[in-house]
Amino acid sequence: MLSICIPVYNYFVADLVQSLHDEAETLNIPYEILLSDNASEEKYRVANSLLGNLSNVNYRQSAINLERAGNRNFLFKTAKFPYILFMDCDSKVSKPNYIKDFLPYCVPGGICSGGRLYEPFNPQYKDAVLHWKVGVARESWPASVRSEKPNHRFMSCNFLIDKKIFDTVKFDERLTGYCNEDTLFGIELQKEGIVISHIDNPLYHTGLEKAEVFMSKIEEGLRNYHKINYLYHNDPQFISSVKILRVEQKLKKWHLLNVCKTLFKMSRKLMYRNLMSLHPNLKVYDLYKLGYLCYSKDFEIK
């Protein structure tokens, strides 16, 4: 019936797995929970490996980092049931019938995204306020909003998929690091004529990161946009699906790319200081991303 697949990297997942296990045991369905540790630090591996003692839970450690795409593809190959429920390890179940609400989509050709939520901000994590603000504003969309652009607003943090579909469109393992592989995955599904369903069955994202770490990943993801465009020969369908790439194309058309690069170089430190503060401005965040995208196309940013 259902393989619940969780790629793990440097995160304690006992609470998440226990809540999934408790619900699955009450549903009277064949299931398994697969944990694939992506070369985490020892303290995480030791603690998480104990979860393999639970019934129907399989814990596996990798000696090398398979990257985000590779680890998900590995879990797909390992899964024994026809439907796969993928989720990120830094997640928390938001309601008692989480698995049950996905079961109606365990049908041939089914693919369904549950969405993501953020809990009310905890002042204890004030150095992660940027990540929280961006997540609430840019990721916590209800199903009605995600369904307006079902494949463009796909997030790989919480989705169910027919294994036969995943056998057709996998995550691209040429992309490494924080790489926007879910954006590309949604577009590749669209090319195959597969439309993603969306429901309100979210997981909380609990892995808030310090602003400096968060921005380093955002910058890595922006550089990967250039890599995706190179690998996919500036695929117009991919570019049209990503707002920041559409804006970059307009700047190029209007011969304003060099202006954007110059302005970013002049104001980068000032914008970055705002993003590291306790009151980051999301407009500044957007301008920083656009400037970085344009500038990083030609230069290595230190």
Image: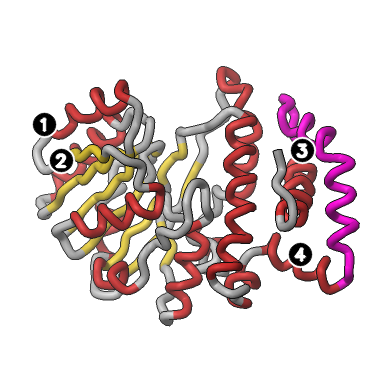
Which of the pair 252/162 is nearer the observer?
Answer: 252
Q: How far apart are marks 2 and 4 (CA)?
A: 45 Å
Dot 3 and dot 1 residues touching (CB under 8 Å): no
Dot 3 and dot 4 residues touching (CB under 8 Å): no
Q: What residue type is labelled 3?
A: Asn
- Spot occupied by residue 190 in the image (x, y as percentages of width and height): 47, 76
Q: Mark 3 points at which residue?
A: 281
Q: Distance between the residues labelled 3 and 1?
A: 46 Å
Which one is closest to the eye, mark 3 or mark 1? 1
**Numbered badge on residue 57:** 2
Question: Mark 2 vs mark 4: which is more N-terminal?
Answer: 2
Label 4, residues with CA under 10 Å away: few <14, some 14-19, many ≥20 = some
Dot 1 and dot 2 residues touching (CB under 8 Å): yes
Label 2, residues with CA under 10 Å away: few <14, some 14-19, many ≥20 = some
Helix, strand or loop under label 2: strand
**Where 158 sits versus 164, above or below?**
above
Q: What residue type is labelled 1?
A: Asn
- Spot occupied by residue 226 in the image (x, y as percentages of width and height): 63, 61
**Numbered badge on residue 247:** 4
Q: What residue type is labelled 4?
A: Val
